[in-house]
Amino acid sequence: MRDWLSHRVVSSPDDPALVRAEDGEVWTYADLDRLVAETAERLAAHGVGEGDHLGVLMPSSVGTVGLVHAAMRLGATFVPLGDRLTPRELAERAAAADVSTLVCAEATEGDAVGAVDALGAVDALDADGVAAPSSGSGPVPILSVDDPDDGSVTALHGIGPEPIDPPRWDPDDRLCLLFTSGTTGDPKAVELTAGNVYSSAIASAFRLGIDPDDRWLVSLSLHHMGGLAPIYRSTLYGTTVVLRSGFDPGGTADDVDRYDVTGVSLVPTMLTRALDRRGTLADSLRAVLLGGAPAPDALIERCRDYSIPVYPTYGMTEAASQIATATPDQAHDRLGTVGRPLFGTDVTVVDGDGSPVEPGETGEIVVSGPTISPGYYGDPEATAVAFGEHGLHTGDIGRVDEDGYLYVLNRVDDRIITGGENVEPGEVAAVLRDHPDVADAAVVGLDDEVWGERVAALIEVPQRPGVSAGGVGGSDDPAAASVDGERDGGVDVEAPGASDGEGSVGEDRVGGDIDDDTDDTGDEGSDPGGSTGGRTDERTDGSTAGKADGQTDERTGERVEGAADTIEGVVGIDDAEVISFARDRLAGFKLPRTIAYTDELPRTVSGTIDRGAVREALIEHGFAPADPDSGFDEAGFRPADPVSARTPGTDNGDGDTGDPGNDDPGSTHGDIEDGGDDGSANGPTGDTDGTASTDGEPSESHGS
C-alpha cells in the first residue's frame, strides 16, 4: 500500500487529524495531507528519496508530525533523535543509523551542526563505548524548517517543491529506526518495519478498543515509541491526536478536559503529578495507558477510587510498543500484573538455559510475534545475542501465572532506568574515568521515589600527600554540601528496596515505550539532581558501607577485598567540576545525582566490581554533588501562527474546512511549540501512546 495518510485522506478528509494543545488549532486529514505533500516534495527537491534515512532533531510539534508522514510518503526511513543529547551522542546515533539527511529547527540547529561536525571524527561506539574512527562517508546535509543562522545549514523552504511518485510499502520495509540500549548495553538502532507498526496498531485496538471520536493526548517525545506510535496509529484508525509540545502536570490534566480527550499515554510519575495538581481527570477518558515503569499499587487504587480507567502495560521499542496490557478491572483485582499478552504476541518465560519454565516460576521474558523488530540496524552481533529459539530476549525477569497474567519483576542486568530513560552505567563510568582527578568509578542505580532510579557513582580518587582526610569528601564549595548543609555523613538516600540492590523495572521493558518527560519546569522538585527526599543522616559511629575485608559476597560467593576502607578517611575532589566535566559529555539525565568518594573500589577476588558493596557505600555515604548547571533547559520554541485558525468543523464559507498550514513549509514545519523539552517527561521506554507500549529506548518496558 501507499503511505497510510494518503489512504486515510481519501476515507475521511474532513475529520480532525491533529489538535495543537497550546492554542486549540485543528488540522483535518485534508489539511495534514497538504502539509505533508509539500514537505515531502521540498525534501525531494533537496535530494531525499526512497531508501534514505531521514534524521529528525526537533521537539514535538505539528512540523515534526508532518515529517513523520513525509518520510513515509517518500519511502524514506524516519530516524528521530532526542534533542536532549549532546552533539557527541547525536553523532554516534546518526552514524549508527546511516542518517543521510538531518532536519532541525531553529532551537536545535546548533546541536545539529555540532553533531554533523562530530561525524567527521566518530562513526559509532565500539564494544567498549569508545568512539571508533569514521568510515569516511561524506558530510550529512542539514535542513532547517526555520530560517537558518549557520552557513552550513540550508532552509527546507529555500527551493521549490519537486513532484514525486510515492512508492508502495511492503510489510517488511523499514519504517523507522528508534534508539535503545537493547539487551546488550550500547545505543542500538531498532528496526521497525511497516508490518511491525501496523500489527501493533491492530493488537492495541483489540485490547483498548476504538471509537471514531477518540482523541489521544500525546505529551511524550516523538523520538520515543510512546509518543510516535499514536501518530501512526491515529492515521490508521482515523482518530485524532491532541499534541502537546511537552508534559506539564496541570496542563496535561487540563487538556483532557478542554479537548474531551479519551486516551492518554503516561508513566506513573506523570499520572501521579497530574492527579496531585488537579485531583482527578475528566470523565471523557476511557483509557490511560500506563507504562514506562511499574505502577505502584497505591496509584492503581487511587485510580479506582476516582474512576480513572488505567491500563498498566508492558512494552518495549523492539515490540513497536505494547506486549501485554491489563484492563482496569484486571489491574485492580491482580495488583502488579501488566495483563495478558496482546493478540498475536507470544510470551515465554525461560530459565538460564533458555528452556521454558512452569507457570508461576520466574525467569527471563522472551517475546515473539508480528510486532517484534527484525533486529538492530547494522549490528548483526547484537541481533544474534538478543534473539533465541523462543524469540526476543527482553532482559526482564518475570512470571506468568496459571491464568496467563504476566508480572514483570526487575531487569536481568544492571541498566539504570531514570525517569523512563535508559542509562548505561559503563558509559557514565567511562566519562568519569576520563577526568584527570578520577582514578576509577563504579556507577549503579539507586531507588528514587520520583524518578524510579537515579544515577549514583562511587568515585575512586588517589590519596594526595599533605591533604588531611575528611571522611566522605566533596568540593570545598559549601554549596556542595548535602541537603541540610552537612558534608560529612552524606545523605541518607535509601528508599524502600534500595538496599537489596534492585532498581526499579526499566523504561525499556517493563514500562514499555513511554518517555517520561516529567522534568517540566513548572513542577517543584522535578529535577532528579540531588533528589534525596530531603533526608539526611549524620553518621557518627564511623561506620563504613563496604563489607569487611575478607568477608564473602552473598550473591557471588567470592571474597571481597579492600572493602573495609571504602569510605572512611578519603578526601574528595571538586565534585562541581567533575559534574561540569561530565555534563559536557553526557545528556543531563545520565549525570550522577548521588556520589561518594573512596580510595579503592570494592572488588571480588576475581577483580570484578562488587556492585552490592558499591550500592551500600552510596546509600550510607552518598550525597548530592554540586552542579553549577543544574536544571533543565527549555526548548525555547515559539509556535508559528497557522494560516487558518478556526474551531473544529468550522466551514470557511467555500465548503472547505480550510488549510491551517501555510503553502510554505517553512512556516508549517517551523511550527515548533515552546517548551517541548523532549528529553524530560517528554522523555521514558514504554510506549504510552495509548495504543502503544511505553518504550523508551529499545526495549521499553512498561510501555504502551
Image (cartoon, rainbow, N blue to C red):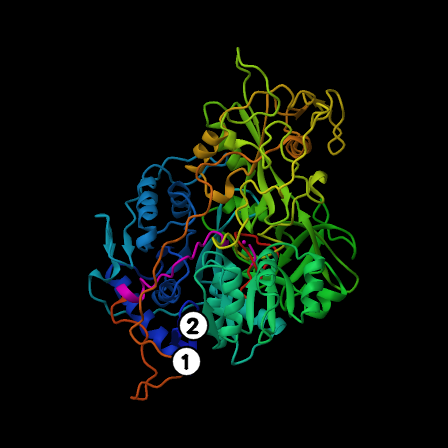
Sort mark 2 into few (<14), some (14-19) or many (20+) by Cα contacts within 10 Å. many
Q: How many marks?
A: 2
Element class at badge 1: loop
Q: Name the residue tied to disc 2.
A: 19
Q: Is residue 508 visible?
A: yes
Q: Mark 1 and mark 2 in contact (Cβ < 8 Å)?
A: yes
Q: Nearer the viewer, residue 437 or 98?
A: 437
Quick check: 223 left or right of 71?
right
**Residue at point 68% right, 23% down?**
563
Q: CA separation, marks 2 and 1? A: 9 Å
Q: Main secondary structure of the magenta part?
A: loop
Q: Is residue 100 visible?
A: no
Q: Is residue 445 magenta?
A: no
Secondary element type, mark 2:
strand
Give the mark, 2 or 1, whose residue is nearer the N terminus.
Answer: 2
- Residue type of the residue flagged with mark 2: Val
Work out whether 649 lies above or below 225: below
Where residue 621 appears, x then y in whole percent?
Answer: 64, 30
Q: Amino acid at mark 1?
A: Pro
Q: Is residue 372 above or below residue 362?
A: below
Residue 414 lies, with reference to residue 322, above or below; the image says above
Image: magenta residue range: 666-686
Give me the residue at 56% from left, 51% from top.
420
Dot label at residue 333: none
Residue drawn at (46%, 27%) of the image: 435
Give the residue at mark 1: 648
Q: Quadrant of the N terminus?
A: bottom left
Task: Where is residue 611? Give x, y as percent.
Answer: 65, 33
On whether residue 684 falls in the magenta region, the answer is yes
